[in-house]
Image (cartoon, helix red, strand yellow):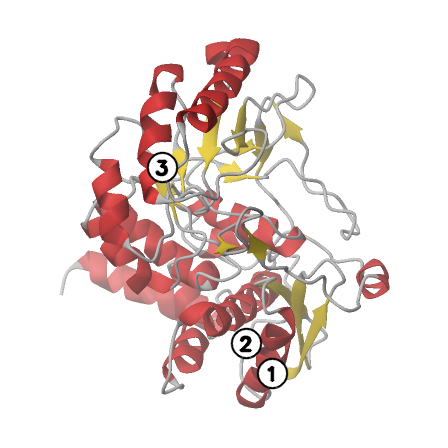
Amino acid sequence: MSRHLIDRRSLLRGALASGALYSLDALFTCQRTNAAAVGPNDNIKVTKVEAFVLKNSWVFVKISTDAGVTGWGEMLKDDAKACAAGALEVGRYLVGQDPNRVVHHWQAIHRGSFYRGGPIKSAILSGIDQALWDIKGKVYGVPVYKLLGGPTRDRIRVYGTVSSTTGVNAMKVAPSAARTAFKYVEGQKFVDEVTERFKALRQKFGSGVDIAVDFHGAVQPTTAILLIKALEPYQPWFYEEVVQALNVDVMAELAKKTHIPLATGERIFLKWGFKEILEKRAATIVQPDVCYAGGITELRIIAGMAEAYYSPVAPHNPNGPCSLAASLQVAASIPNFLIQERGDTEHPLLAKPLPPVKNGYRELPTEPGLGITIDENKLMAQVGEPQEYRTHYDPDDGSVVDW
């Protein structure tokens, strides 16, 4: 036996004997800090799972433990009540369990069901996963990204509102016209109007601002091909959800017709949903959402899959503070991160703001867990009946249209 192996084993035995390590997995991630909420030899169990639906349709899950450590997560805002009820059902499994076994619980919740995946079940799993990582980070006294191998960058680029104050120099717009695109084939007048408005936007901001175009899956493929070609001369940063993500072959066909990168992911769930996107090169930028693509655990895996195809990750984020905080933890820990959507948003539900955005970047969170503290009084004041998502219709003939 080599001296190297003897020294390594001696080091490990000594560390375990002294309580310097909480478990073997800490050896490969990070050591505990003085901010650790639980002692190295203390057990910790889940005691309660709660869910809260806000009036703006944001859905939060809170996991409590017998050590007084709590974790927060966020879920899909569509089908808000169903997600909240589902989180409580998961509580029947989770109560009494050690919350530190995050990946084990991910597998148990996902594979414990006969019917798997889909938006609601994946969203429930996503919120629970965020909350468990939040707890584990607090147990060790470190931000989650330090449990995922440490930071891969020093700061996180964000996009949202272009501003000289924050330095944000990237934004996203819809194909703007006097009305939205709802016809199967829009006429030349519509295409020209969208093109002229984007041209004016490009002239206003110049080449120093990245401007993406979000079709939001509401534009039919027959119109999308017209728009992506008409907008090309003004160099959109990327085209997002040029069509509905359900038909990957159509998206892959459109991707071959333009040199502008295509992005998608906000309506795709789990690693299996992204597999076909990557294999068929339907998009070169993937945008998984931490609130319903599988949580932090799954986003890390999706990012690894994307890296094999040299595809960057730009996490989708239209939601609340847990969504942003969890996305930042992923962004800090993966090598192929591109930019964080709405990363410049400041959330009043937080007891303490995130590190400020400077020069278009947000500094890495340093607080344990997700790096945030929810102001529960402010959150409870917003609990209520979620807003209704209304069906959209073609005003000319009354048929249902995408939005």
Task: Determine the residue positioned at 66% across, 16% down.
Answer: 164
Label 2 with label 1: CB-CB less than 8 Å: yes
Q: Position of residue 90 (x, y in %)?
A: 55, 83
The answer to whether any part of residue 234 appears in the image is yes
Name the disc covering residue 99, or none: 2
* Nearer to the camera, 256 or 32: 256
The residue that label 1 is drawn on is 45
Residue 312 visible in this rendered orientation of the protein: no
Q: Amino acid at mark 3?
A: Ala
**Crowding at mark 1 (Cα within 10 Å: few <14, some 14-19, many 20+):** some
Q: In the picture provided, is 363 more to the left or to the right than 385?
A: left
Task: Locate residue 369: give its quadrant.
Answer: bottom right
Location of the N terminus (image quadrant)? bottom left
| Residue 222 image offset from top left, x and y in percent | 32, 40
Q: Position of residue 102 (x, y in %)?
A: 47, 71
Q: Which residue is mark 3?
A: 224
Residue 187, image x, y percentages: 41, 30
The nearer-to-camera label among 1 and 3 is 3
Q: Earlier in the sequence, mark 2 or mark 3?
A: 2
Q: Earlier in the sequence, mark 1 or mark 3?
A: 1
Judged from the image, the secondary structure of the residue bearing numbered disc 1 is loop
Instruction: From this view, report whether residue 196 is shown above or below residue 293.
Output: above
Q: Which amino acid type is marked by label 1? A: Lys
Q: Is residue 145 above or below residue 119?
A: above
Label 2 is placed on what type of residue? Pro
In this rendering, the answer to whether 30 lies above or below 157 is below
Q: Give the residue at x 46% y 75%.
A: 101
Residues packed near mark 2 inside 10 Å, few (<14), some (14 to 19) or many (20 plus): many
User: Residue at point 63% right, 59% down?
Assistant: 390
Crowdedness near tag 3: few (<14), some (14–19) or many (≥20) residues, C-alpha within 10 Å = many
